[in-house]
Image (cartoon, rainbow, N blue to C red):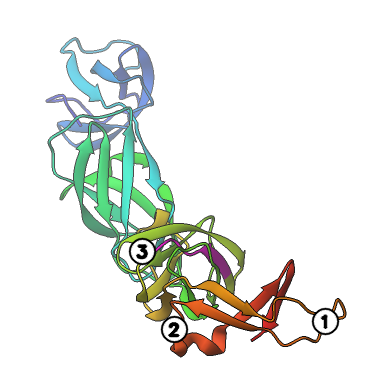
Amino acid sequence: HGSYLGFVDSADVMCRVGTISGVHASHVSTDEISCLMPAHAPGNVPVEITLNRFDHTFNEAAYHYEAMITTLGPIPTRVLAEGGGEITLSLWPSEDTDMSLVCIVDTFPVPASKLSAGTFLCMTPPRAPGFVALDMAIEDSDILSLHPTVLEYQVIPTVTGLNPAIGIDSGVSVIKVGGRHLVGNEAFCHVGYDSQVQAEIISSVLIKCEAPAHEPGRVVIEISTSDHGEQFSHNDIIYEYIEEGAVVAIVPREGSQNGGTVVRLAMSNLDVGTASFLTCKFGTIAPLRS
């Protein structure tokens, strides 16, 4: 608003912003008008008024144009609908500030933690699956950015089964993970508490991953299809590691090329509890039921 005591009501009242004349003005009261500010480069500019379109005041009241800030990101672009996902946002031009900022997820503000100059970390709140607008603001103040970005909330993936559900402790087994809502740009399998491996999305109901080496025992396998492997399913599907066995003897050692010979194998480290899963391989022919 601009103040000019004693002016009369006139259709010729206008504002001048820097070198831009003819800026629309309207009466607020007998000694006050408002100006609709035009676009301008960042910085301070003088603001004057005229009552006759020609003669302007010379008080040079200063108005400051803030640089337009754009929100970049988020990283990652997808999180789970259950909330609790970590995303990073950046401001451009980069702003090094100690002000308390918040991320605005749709219309819901969540605290933002500063990672570096112009880069902030936010924890996503729960939301229904779909796309939401994402922006940043000064806490208890206006939105900073005029160009909000978009965040996608995904349905939580579900694991329903593994094939095979058992493998040797040296790893290398390719596990087919069946489930629902297995969609995204990338996937990870979480094996036990400390191993995470890249997975391949085959379809919305099938993912493949290679089991890493692990000590014998049972582990839970969960999957992630969003947020760079930060959030996973919660289905507690069990995969069992067994100690790798070795063939130490074979009887008989010879047989007809027509096949049909019953061969007995002696093995070390054989777990009788896994006997129903055993198969044989002769040359390149496998699997053969044992």
Which residue has dot 1 on it? 259
At x 22%, y 23%, the residue is 64
At x 36%, y 73%, the residue is 216
Residue 187 among magenta residues: no
Residue 12 image offset from top left, x and y in percent: 34, 24
Q: Tell me the amino acid under the disc marked 1.
A: Gly
The answer to whether 149 is drawn above or below residue 80 in the figure is: above
| Secondary structure type for disc 1 | loop
Mark 3–mark 2 contact, CB under 8 Å?
Answer: no
Q: Tell me the amino acid under the disc marked 3.
A: Gln
Left or right side of 140 for 217: right
Q: Quadrant of the N terminus?
A: top left
Mark 1–mark 3 contact, CB under 8 Å?
Answer: no
Other-residue count near label 2 (Cα within 10 Å), few / some / many at <14 / 14–19 / ≥20: few
| Secondary structure type for disc 2 | loop
| Secondary structure type for disc 3 | loop
Other-residue count near label 1 (Cα within 10 Å), few / some / many at <14 / 14–19 / ≥20: few
Other-residue count near label 3 (Cα within 10 Å), few / some / many at <14 / 14–19 / ≥20: many
Mark linked to residue 231:
3
Q: Earlier in the sequence, mark 2 or mark 1?
A: 1
Depth check: 41 or 279 in front? 279
**Spatial separation of the CA atoms under disc 1 and disc 3:** 51 Å
Q: Earlier in the sequence, mark 3 or mark 2?
A: 3
Q: Tell me the amino acid under the disc marked 2.
A: Asp
- Which one is in front in this view, the residue at disc 3 or the one at disc 2? 2
Q: Quadrant of the C terminus?
A: bottom right
Which residue has dot 2 on it? 271
The answer to whether 191 is drawn above or below residue 137 in the figure is: below
The span shown in magenta is: 207-214
Depth check: 156 or 255 in front? 255
Residue 126, by quadrant, is bottom left
Depth check: 197 or 250 in front? 250
